[in-house]
Amino acid sequence: MSERTRLTTVESVHESRSWLFTIEDEYGEEDEVILVPCENHVENGSTSSQPTAEDGVEAWINRCTHEAQRLDTGRGAAMRDGQLICPKHGSMFDTCSGYCDNGEAADTTLSSVDVTVDDGVVYLTDDDVSFAHEGDIDNGDDDDGPASTSHIGF
């Protein structure tokens, strides 16, 4: 590991349920990554809703394996019972392993990005990519909507 970039805290990811950021590969191509809670502990047969020191996060490319649908469109990812839900077809991916065992994306696994947690802080440690910025690829630079070539104003 040659370098690491501070992203956020485990606590922040667990509170917001996801954290979106953009990476850049060695060719300058951007991609989105989603940090999600990975709750490793179990109490009385079910996962506890309160994060502990044993809990962490995992980082996945923000794309369903079925049709390249974004899992987080910039407003947070849909999640239930430790699984990311694809908004298009409902396939569910385990937040800790990235594996999907149902729906259109069954028997596939999300592409991972290397992160490390050190004293509650999440760092990007993947040597194949670099941190571009927090948020989606557009980084919220959307204007008021699609451009129109029509002479009719709205």
Image (cartoon, rainbow, N blue to C red):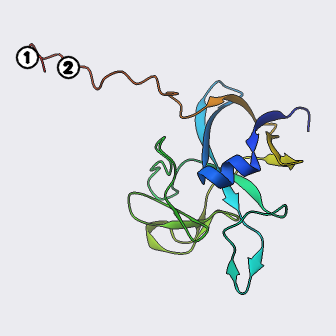
Asked whether, in this view, residue 10 is left or right of residue 141, the answer is: right
- Quarter-of-image position of residue 54: bottom right
Q: Which residue is mark 2?
A: 148
Residue with the most extreme front position: 50
Amino acid bearing label 1 = Ile
Q: Which residue is mark 1?
A: 152
| In this view, 16 is above or below 105 | above
- Quarter-of-image position of residue 27: top right
Tell me which residue sits at (46%, 44%) in the image.
73
Which residue is nearer to you in this view: 29 or 55? 55
Asked whether, in this view, residue 140 is left or right of residue 24, the answer is: left
Amino acid bearing label 2 = Ser
Q: x, y percentage for residue 104? A: 44, 68
Res 56 visible: yes
| In this view, 20 is above or below 154 | below
Label 2 – label 1 distance at C-alpha: 9 Å
Which residue is nearer to you in this view: 28 or 71? 71
Mark 2 element type = loop
Which residue is nearer to you in this view: 4 or 78? 78
